[in-house]
Amino acid sequence: MRTPHPILLVCLGVVFGCGIDALMKYVMQGATSVLTATTWRYALGSAIMLALFLQARRPFPSLPAIRFHALRSLAQVISAFCFFYSLTQIALAEAVVLGFTAALMIAPIARIILGEKMSPVTIGASLVGFCGAALAATAETSGAPADGNRLHGTASVLASAVLYALNIVLLRLRTREEDSLTLVTFMNIFPALFLLPFMLVFTDPLPADGAWTLLTGAAVFGIGIWWLMTMAYARAKAQTLAPFEYTGLIWSALLGYFFFQEIPGWRVWAGAGIIIAACLVVAFETHFAARREAKLPASDILT
């Protein structure tokens, strides 16, 4: 069977990601708390990934690797919790647009942790992108959560973006040492372990009736994203595929409209355009910089 085109795989992965957001938002609009929903999303994902990990007979990571996964998962789980909380406060499309700023935060975090250089173009594009985020944050979306707090929602999704970028930078330190199956297995196990005691102490540990199927779907979608993106980026260059990840705005707007009756205002779309343009500038500038350091011509950028 022929593998689909990488662009199609990325677009399908984006659909899965927006599907997770919509499923989690729907669950949390019921009687299930953000903490309970997030915990079970990772717990169910852990059960699936652990079964795949054991079946593949992968070697168990070393103790230093386990400590690293635990530390990195702290950033990951707090990021996920903040993002899912933001879905209860602002519209789905607004959260996704503001989440795009994570791509702008990777460069400065990599500068601090990995010592990677930031060009003036990257710095300028990042500042422009954050202006787009500020514009999107002032938008008024029809159908947004009636009892939501825009300030809390915006702050939560931006905090999530910072921690997500930190998680991506830390992940770079392990991708050359461990296979993707091992990485994704622990990306589910540790968040579940971190959240479980808090769920047992601070909230009802059982989801509302009918939420189990949706949470299982969210866990499966989460694994599906990893599978699709891994296949896509193994067969095509990152700069070719990255622009298609921003199709998430379209899907989040459609899902928000059909399931939550949310209609984003023009500032959301305008802010998204600015953020996406800034992200693409940063992505291509990073690629050009790498080629300059390697003393390679830029004329074959798209080859």
Image (cartoon, rainbow, N blue to C red):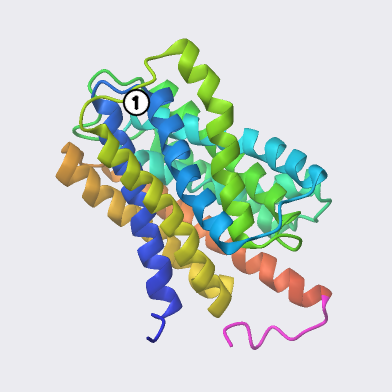
Quarter of the rendering containing residue 207: top left
Quarter of the rendering containing residue 146: top left
Q: Is residue 297 magenta?
A: yes
149 relative to 227, above or below: above
Q: Is residue 158 visible?
A: yes
Magenta span dominant secondary structure? loop
Residue 115: percent from the left, percent from the top?
84, 51
In the image, 55 versus 37, the foreground residue is 55
In the image, 36 versus 53, the foreground residue is 53
Q: Residues within 10 Å of mark 1 (few under 14, many from 20)?
A: many
In the image, 97 versus 92, the foreground residue is 92
Q: Which residue is pictured at 15% across the width and 46% down the height?
A: 258
Which corner quadrant holds the C terminus?
A: bottom right
Q: Is residue 282 visible?
A: no
Q: Which residue is pictured at 62% across the width and 82% down the height?
A: 301
Q: Which residue is pictured at 41% across the width and 55% down the height?
A: 273
Residue identifier under label 1: 89
Magenta-colored span: 294-303
Which corner quadrant holds the N terminus?
A: bottom left
Residue 189: percent from the left, percent from the top?
57, 40
Q: Is residue 125 left or right of residue 213?
A: right
